[in-house]
Image (spheres, helix red, strand yellow):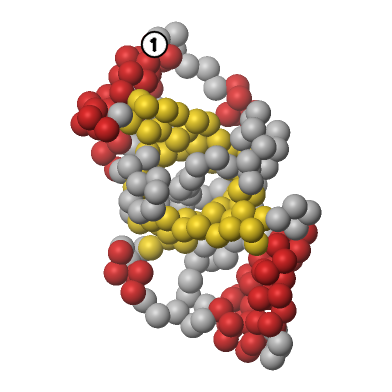
Amino acid sequence: MKKGIALFLPLLMATLIFGQDKTKMRVIILKPKADMIGEFEKGLAAHVAKFHAQATDPVTVYEVASGKHTGEYHFIQGPSSWADMEGKVYAGDHSDDWNKSVGKFLQSSETHYLTYQPDFSYNPNQGAADWTVVTFITLNPNSTGTYESMMKTRKDALTKAKDGRNYQVFSHSFSGRDDEFSYAVAADLKGGLKELDTDLTPLAKVLGDQVGPYAQQQWAYDADKVLKKVESMLVHRMAALSSK
């Protein structure tokens, strides 16, 4: 299974408590037909209520609220272990209900997998924020080691500075397709959309204060070598469509 992502995961990105071995998340990216969004949401809510109870198989649903993928819905299961995720057995009518309640209203759907990376995540929240900014990182070939070192440096500097921001880092994979995205960074807006206007200490200053006077120059040099593309999006947790 190769690292990558075809669309966007919020993931994608539910701010959940990860156990030591429960780091895997399945994300089904759903694109409803433009004229059937109401029917799609109603059917998805009914399916989740019937088959995905919070206590047994919790699901969090997000809607993409910005960028070219606006209007997509991300159906997220986990965190879990691979064994639990792959060994999950549903009632015999689960697939039929999905096709009847959800599938017939879809233009397309794709499945992706996330793996939480605690070594690179900083001050992650406990609980699910209503709004999250997700940044997707496209790396140049053979750049994984350098990028991971950059993420570790950033985390160490923020930790020393006792900085107030928070984010979770995920690697991801998609079976049968060689996609270019290798990492996703999800930053929770605990205070809602107003946090988008909050002034945080620039990373350049944090790196300069905590690492050294040339830390930002080194960061910029490394970024120029490894980053092929960086794209951010805003996602909104759809409580009415998620597990209760």
The relative height of residue 155 versus residue 80 in the rendered view (above or below) is: below
The relative height of residue 75 versus residue 222 in the rendered view (above or below) is: above
Q: Is residue 197 left or right of residue 91?
A: left
Q: Please name the residue shown 63% across and 89% down the image.
A: 209
Task: Kindly indicate the quadrant of the structure image that contains residue 226.
Answer: bottom right
Q: Please name the residue shown 56% across and 48% down the image.
A: 18
Task: Kindly indicate the quadrant of the structure image that contains residue 30.
Answer: top left
Residue 52 spot, x, y in % from top left? 39, 27
Residue 215 spot, x, y in % from top left? 69, 83
In the rendered view of the protein, which quadrant contains the N terminus? Answer: top right
Residue where numbered disc 1 is placed: 96
Mark 1: few/some/many CA within 10 Å (<14, 14-19, 20+): few
Q: Is residue 241 left or right of residue 21?
A: left
The relative height of residue 84 versus residue 117 in the rendered view (above or below) is: above
Relative depth, front residue between 25 and 175: 175
Q: Please name the residue shown 38% across and 63% down the image.
A: 189
Label 1 sits on a secondary structure element that is: helix
Q: Amino acid at mark 1?
A: Asp
